Image (cartoon, rainbow, N blue to C red):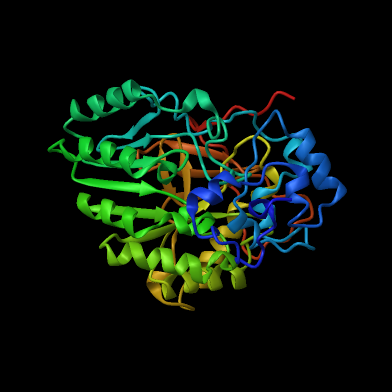
Amino acid sequence: MRHDQQRPLDHSHPQWRDWRWQMRHRIHSVDTLAQWIQLTDAERQAIEATQGIFRWNITPYYASLMDPEDPNCPIRRQVVPRLEELAPDLIDSLDPLEEVAHSPVKNLIHNYRDRVAFCVTSECAIYCRYCLRKRMVGDAAFMMRKAELEAAISYIAAHPEIRDVLLTGGDPLTLSEAHLAWILERLRAIPHVEIIRIGTRMPVKLPYRITPELCALLERFHPLWINTHFNHPKELTPDAAEAVDRLLRAGIPVGNQTVLLRGINDDIDTMKALCEGLVRIRVRPYYLYQAQLIGGTAHFRTPIETGMALMRALQGNTTGFAIPKYVLDTPYGKVPLDGTYVKGRSGDYVIVETPRGVLWAEPNPIPPGETLSFRLPEIPWPEGVATLPLATS
């Protein structure tokens, strides 16, 4: 085995902190993964069985955070395929937010009047098993050619109501500095674009991408904000903190968007440690997302009451700005999951009113035998409520 193929668990490899080396050496085979963790038979079967469903990729850095002996390690569960992904689910959809329907041009999502999400790439450093955009991540068909990027930028320029552009994907920071600079320069040339945001998980999964050169580039395009995606306290490493510090010193505010995940962060001790750990490294907990109804992710989802109970437990027991806003994303916008918008439970559905005034029924059954510390009131099924079509099989 050549030196550059050796398992670098102790971070001693001379190129360990080179983000391009990390990308080139991503783990995507059973044999390579077996060098990092003691694979169970179920994990081996899942990797084989899910090959045609959703790709998997893990950076060596992120692999080094996994417990090699515990298949329920919260880091391992986020990225290693599991057989539960093949179990029957409530819905078949890979696009429950109807992003494609809100895309006037390729990869540009215009669901809010004054802002757009611009998926500038379909590539990520790792593929999270619960990913909102499983339909596109890692798929070459969703990569953006220059003419397609031009079309999206032209659409933004032609719509003066758009004041806020979120660069997302995939992960925009998989792009080179030159590619990023071209996109940012074009957007900054549009007078009505006031804010540019970047959604990236690089500080979590590959913090070495946050180089001084990248920060110097981003600093040229203020006001620019970054939201990242820590899900568990084990991800709050010194390397991650160093990456965040570089961004902050470049004048870039950093927020965090956590997804509520069953068995990973759905207990108060873990969530409190995560939120307080984020504040210690000067990252503002921004959103806690209810896990989306992406087909094959039922094992990650919790009852909405679980998240509401977590919010109640955090309130008054930690710093106020360490408490994120718990939200449900719907085709009609994000809904705060609190007493203002949540109307109650109707059987297997939670009824909410979206900020646009549409009643939405979120399929969210309580698993049989599960005991909840907090229960929503049961209400009749409302007239005119919108919901997702359930799976037919």
The single residue placed furthest to the right in the displayed view is 41
Q: Tell me which residue sits at (40%, 27%) in the image.
A: 144
x%, y% of residue 289?
A: 50, 52
> Which quadrant of the structure image shows residue 194?
top left
Q: Nearer the viewer, residue 212 or 113?
A: 212
Relative height, residue 118 to residue 10 (above, below) = above
x%, y% of residue 39?
A: 81, 52
Q: Tell me which residue sits at (56%, 65%) in the image.
A: 310
Relative height, residue 280 to residue 226 (above, below) = below
Q: Nearer the viewer, residue 260 or 388?
A: 260
Res. 376 visible in picture? no
Q: Tell me which residue sits at (26%, 29%) in the image.
A: 153
Q: Is residue 279 left or right of 184 when viewed as pictured?
A: right
The single residue placed furthest to the left in the displayed view is 191
Q: Is residue 265 left or right of 353 when viewed as pictured?
A: right
Q: Is residue 94 left or right of 372 when viewed as pictured?
A: left
- Image quadrant for the C terminus? top right
Q: Nearer the viewer, residue 55 or 7?
A: 7
Q: Tell me which residue sits at (54%, 38%) in the image.
A: 361
x%, y% of residue 223?
A: 21, 53
Q: Is residue 182 left or right of 229 when viewed as pictured?
A: left
x%, y% of residue 282?
A: 38, 71
Q: How many marks?
A: 0
Res. 299 visible in picture? yes
Relative height, residue 263 to residue 95 (above, below) = below
